[in-house]
Image (cartoon, rainbow, N blue to C red):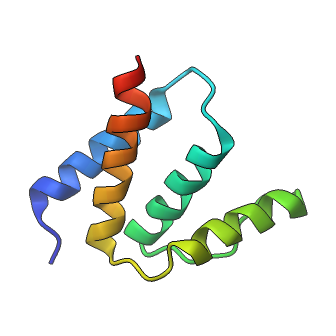
Amino acid sequence: MIDEKLHKKFNKAVDFVNDYTEPLPADLLLKLYAYYKIANKNFDHPGSKTPLINAFKANALIQAKNISIEEAMQSYIKLVDIEIRMKE
């Protein structure tokens, strides 16, 4: 069972990223994508119409495949805090 406090922090971090208006580096977005998908147990194929983007997304998921849901949430939160919030 996922800690409710962790789940709330994760959702706040997701909302922060969704509301963020400045451009973010592609490598950061791919990491966030992979952690988000793992945290939400969503392993559907990437839905981009661009094959290259799908390949990058699939690669990001493969690189993060051995982490737990909790680790994915924690990693997402940490990336948002370090790479986005602290640079504002």
Residue in the picture at 15% in, 78% down: 1
Task: Name the quadrant containing residue 28.
Answer: top right
State how many labels appear.
0
| Residue lying farthest to the top in this orientation | 88
In this view, 48 is above or below 13: below
Q: Residue at x 49, y 66 (%)?
A: 37
* Image point (61%, 54%), residue name: 30
Residue at left offset 30%, top offset 68%: 71
Residue 80, x across and y down, in percent: 38, 40
Image quadrant where one finds the C terminus? top left
Tell whether 73 sits left or right of 22.
left
77 on left or right of 40: left
Front in this rendered view, residue 28 or 9: 28
**Is 68 drawn above or below residue 84 in the view shown?**
below
- Point out residue 6 in the picture as x, y percentages from the top left corner: 17, 56
Q: Nearer the viewer, residue 57 or 8?
A: 57
* 9 sits left or right of 61 in the view: left
Instruction: Classify 59 as above or below 65.
Output: above
Query: Within the image, what quadrant is residue 70 found in?
Result: bottom left
Residue placed farthest to the bottom in the image?
Answer: 66
Residue 49 in picture, x, y percent from top left: 86, 58
Identify which residue, 54 or 27, lies in the foreground: 27
Residue 77 image position (x, y, % from top left): 31, 48
